[in-house]
Image (spheres, rainbow, N blue to C red):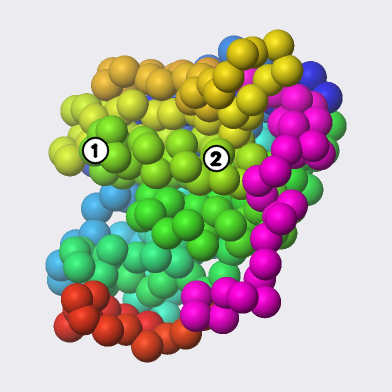
Amino acid sequence: MKDLRVAFLQIAPTGSVEGNLEKGRTYCRMAKEQGADIALFPEMWSSGYQIPEEIERLKALAVPRDGDFVLAFQTLAKELQMAVGITYLEAWEPLPRNTITLFDRHGREAYTYAKVHTCDFGEECRLTAGDDFYVADLDTEKGMVRVGSMICYDREFPESARILMLKGAELVLVPNACPMEINRISQLRSRAYENMIGIATVNYPEQQPDCNGHSTAFDGIAYRPQDAGSRDTLFMEADGSEGIFIADFPIDEIRDYRSREVHGNAYRHPHKYGLLVAEEIREPFIRKDYRR
């Protein structure tokens, strides 16, 4: 497989669902002109990561999975022969969800994933959390690649990327909406290293409140035979500006690396990890706003 080209749409919202639809279409077309195999939006693009406090306003802002907003990108993916990871505030009961749908180059839905680790300490307490992680074989012009997603805060839980790795993900697409600083970027570096996966994270630019750009691409390859020691798996980091940033993921090299290195699922002892699925929470980690 030739390197898989991901377009990071590090773009600012317009203030309306309709405006975001049109701007999103424009940037997808620009991404295709730059040879992208996948175009990825930042978190909850339909609303520009707006979560109104008033529940009726929140529900009115949400868009259905089979509605005009999402279907427009399905049509566009087929037209452009390019996969599109479109993000949106999804209409759901009892409360909306923070969702990504990935369409392949034929306009077929590869998966729909709702954020599992909602930020319940903040405004995402008004959203419904997802209940699982999904992967799919994505049909690209360069061949099949196994893809999954996390969304923003999901990255802070090693279990998110680990489950995706165990389900076979080779590349993880991560929509984001927060300041990407050294510690959050380091979390992504760890997720890529310990699972030997590519990770593509796209953020809003610095003109969006509480965001700063710095979308990142990690290939998960810490050691190359030709190198004397360990290398940084971060191979693309955007600045804070608005625009399209391109990263070419070396899928064949990632596959070769995974076939011989020691991380991922090569030497795990899951029968010893029972405590990881225990639901008891003890001090100092008890939080009154935690939702199961």
- Compared to residue 159, the image places residue 28 above or below, namely above
Circle 2: residue type: Ala
Q: Quadrant of the C terminus?
A: bottom left
Q: Is 181 situated left or right of 139 in this image?
A: left
Image coords of residue 87 (percent x, y): 46, 48
Q: Is residue 142 visible?
A: no
Q: Quadrant of the N terminus?
A: top right
Q: Which residues are magenta?
A: 247-276
Please state which of residues 251 and 31 is positioned toward the viewer in this rendering.
251
When asked about the image quadrant of residue 31, the answer is top right
Q: Is 54 situated left or right of 15 in this image?
A: left
Image coords of residue 115 (percent x, y): 44, 62
Q: CA distance from mark 2 to mark 1?
A: 19 Å
- Compared to residue 228, the image places residue 166 above or below, namely below
- Of label 2 and label 1, which has the lower sequence position? 1
Q: Is residue 227 magenta?
A: no
When asked about the image quadrant of residue 51, the answer is bottom left
Q: Secondary structure at mark 1?
A: loop
Instruction: Give the residue pinned by disc 2.
Output: 192
Instruction: Give the residue pinned by disc 1.
Output: 179
Q: Say few, some or many: other residues with alpha carbon within 10 Å of mark 1 (under 14 / 14 to 19 / 20 or more).
A: some
Residue pictured at 27% horizontal, 21% vertical:
240
